[in-house]
Image (cartoon, helix red, strand yellow):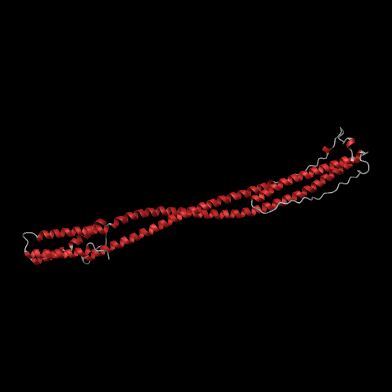
Amino acid sequence: MIADLLTTLEDEKDQWIFQAIDRFNERFLVFGYQRDGTAEDQVTEMKNNEHSMYKERSLDLERMEIELKTLVEGLAADERTIENLELTCDVLQKELAIYEDEEKVLDQIQLEKFECLLDDKFTFDRKDQVVFKERKVSRLLESYNLVEMEMVDFYQRQLSRIWVLMSRSMQNIDSTAKVDFKTDPPLIELSLKHGRGLDHYLKSGNFEEDYRIVLDTLVRNNESVYDYYVSQVEQFKDNGKAEILGLWERKNDQKKLAAETLSDLQEKKAQREARILELQDQLGRAKSEWEQNRLRPKVLEDMLKEEFVKLVSNWQEKLFAESASDEERWAYHQYCQIILKQAERIIGNEYV
């Protein structure tokens, strides 16, 4: 009789452990635990596995948090760099606009040609001829000098205006080029055919011929002076435009490079932002799972305790039953001690 009881108790002494394992597996849908080896070995293996999973998930969380922190810090750096590049592109675009405006200014600079008006220095009669009293050598020479002075003043005023415009353009592009006009145009001397001796022309034909000589000399000198100055103006314009073009091309290359870098960085920023959102979502779910899994070892401990208490309580009822024999009480007492030792070994132990 006692032998049968001992056999029964031997079979039951590990069932509380298996029962706890089954409950744990059922609750957490754990697969892969087979009833191979002793019950204690299986509990130890489960605890070790749970601890390994907890450490692995903790490391995964740590890696994800480090990556997220790195991404956020990198995003802040990207935003600062993007802001600087946008400012750089804006500054370069304004500089390009300055060069383009100054090139237009140079294009618009033109040297006007003086108009030699000799007729307005004389009075004409009804026959459209200079009145007799003004047909004088002195009057011709005086008119010649007046028109020539007007011509010199006309070009000087234009050159002053052009000098200001060109100098300002060179300053606006930070150029060191100098605008320095030469002011010694070649001139032919006036040589009258009949203006010798008497001041007054006795023959109208002689006056008219000298009048044409004066006008022709003025026209030829005006043509020469205009060509002299306009060639300098065009040369300064060409030099200025060539320098502007060189500066524009260099600035435009810098802008292109900055714009390409900005575009690449904006794309990188968008990818980083997408990865941050993805990682934040993964991290949120992983933390939730980690919190749940963190409690699994304690749940296993609680289930082991509950099953232990249930079995001990059952055996103690039989131990203290009035109908129990001394041999039975001894057997129940011995096996209560056995599972107590089991419980001490497997409940509350640290993971190995």
Q: State the residue lying farthest toward the top.
A: 126
Location of residue 330 in the rendering, given as x and y in whole percent from the top left corner: 9, 65
Location of residue 26 in the rendering, given as x and y in whole percent from the top left corner: 24, 57
Q: Is residue 103 above or below residue 318?
A: above
Residue drawn at point x = 35 percent, y = 53 percent: 284
| Placement of the N terminus among the 4 image quadrants | bottom left
Q: Is residue 196 left or right of residue 46?
A: right
Q: Is residue 205 above or below residue 91?
A: above
Taking the image as drawn, is residue 25 in sight?
no
Depth order, front residue of 259/166 = 166
Q: Is residue 274 left or right of residue 214?
A: left
Q: Is residue 258 above or below residue 201?
A: below
Taking the image as drawn, is residue 96 in sight?
yes
Number of callouts: 0
Q: Is residue 315 left or right of residue 238?
A: left
Residue drawn at point x = 86 percent, y = 42 percent: 141
Q: Is residue 135 left or right of residue 272?
A: right
Location of residue 221 in the rendering, given as x and y in whole percent from the top left corner: 81, 47
Q: Is residue 325 above or below residue 273?
A: below
| Placement of the C terminus among the 4 image quadrants | bottom left
Location of residue 350 in the rendering, given as x and y in whole percent from the top left corner: 26, 64
| Image quadrant in which you'd find residue 35 | bottom left
